[in-house]
Amino acid sequence: MTLRKWTVGLAMLCASSSPVFAQDLKSPSVGEYVPRLGDIMSAAQTRHQKLWLAGKAQNWDLAAFELRQLKASLVEAAVLYSGIPISNVTTLEAPLNAVSAAIAAKDGKKFASAAADLTAGCNACHRTMERGFIVMKVPADPQPFGNQAFPPERKP
Ligand code: HEC
């Protein structure tokens, strides 16, 4: 088969399979696609950063949302990767709850200290899993996510 035929075939395959992808998005099946742990963690990193930025901007609705997303990533890591000691995940429960409480109380000071504890929890697991070189920190400005607005929307 010529390169051109391959390219056309590939393009058709992609075109015909796009509705399937859309369906998969609606009802993901763990058996079909298992994200790599590093990919789950990269998502966690994004959420961790956004959580911080939203909290700093006192956008508590967005912070609550990002916290939910972050928790989901951590749960996903624990469920899909049984090699992760469960205690490494459960020790994060206290700081996660503290962040949640700070968000509910709209308390910026408590939020900052709970977020720092949470970040220490990330690093504790990385150390015990021979990934001590992956060091998370409370995000510093300037922020890399220039593609999203973090301050809360002004209500008319
Ligand atoms: C239960 C253990 C555990 C916890 C908790 C944990 N991680 Fe990880 N993380 C890992 C492991 C293991 C890897 C290495 C994955 C690999 O080797 O592919 C990793 C990798 C990473 C990476 C590197 C991803 C890449 O591909 O560059 C980032 C970033 C990361 N974690 C962020 C976080 C953040 C942020 C938190 C806390 C909110 C966190 N992790 C909590 C176990 C953990």
Image: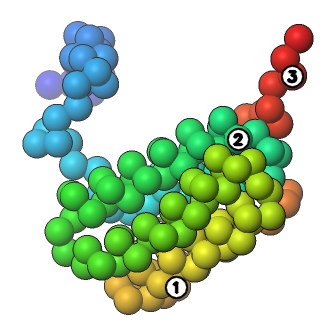
Q: CA distance from mark 2 to mark 1?
A: 32 Å
**Mark sitting earlier along the chain (2/1):** 2
Residue 42 in the image: state x and y as whole percent.
48, 57
Q: Judge by depth and name the residue closer to the eye, 96 or 134.
A: 96
Q: Nearer the viewer, mark 2 or mark 1?
A: 2
Q: Judge by depth and name the residue closer to the eye, 134 or 47.
A: 47
User: Please, what is the three-letter code of the amino acid marked with disc 1?
Assistant: Phe
User: Please, what is the three-letter code of the amino acid marked with disc 2?
Assistant: Trp
**Which residue is pictured at 14% across the width and 39% down the height?**
32
Q: Secondary structure at mark 1?
A: loop
Residue 52 in the image: state x and y as whole percent.
70, 55
Q: Quadrant holding ligand 1? A: bottom left
Residue 137 in the image: state x and y as whole percent.
67, 73
- Residue at numbered disc 3: 154
Q: Quadrant of the N terminus?
A: top left
- The answer to whether 24 is drawn above or below residue 18 in the figure is below
Image quadrant assignment for residue 156 = top right
- Residue at numbered disc 2: 60
- Residue at numbered disc 1: 133
**Which residue is pictured at 26% across the width and 11% down the height?**
19
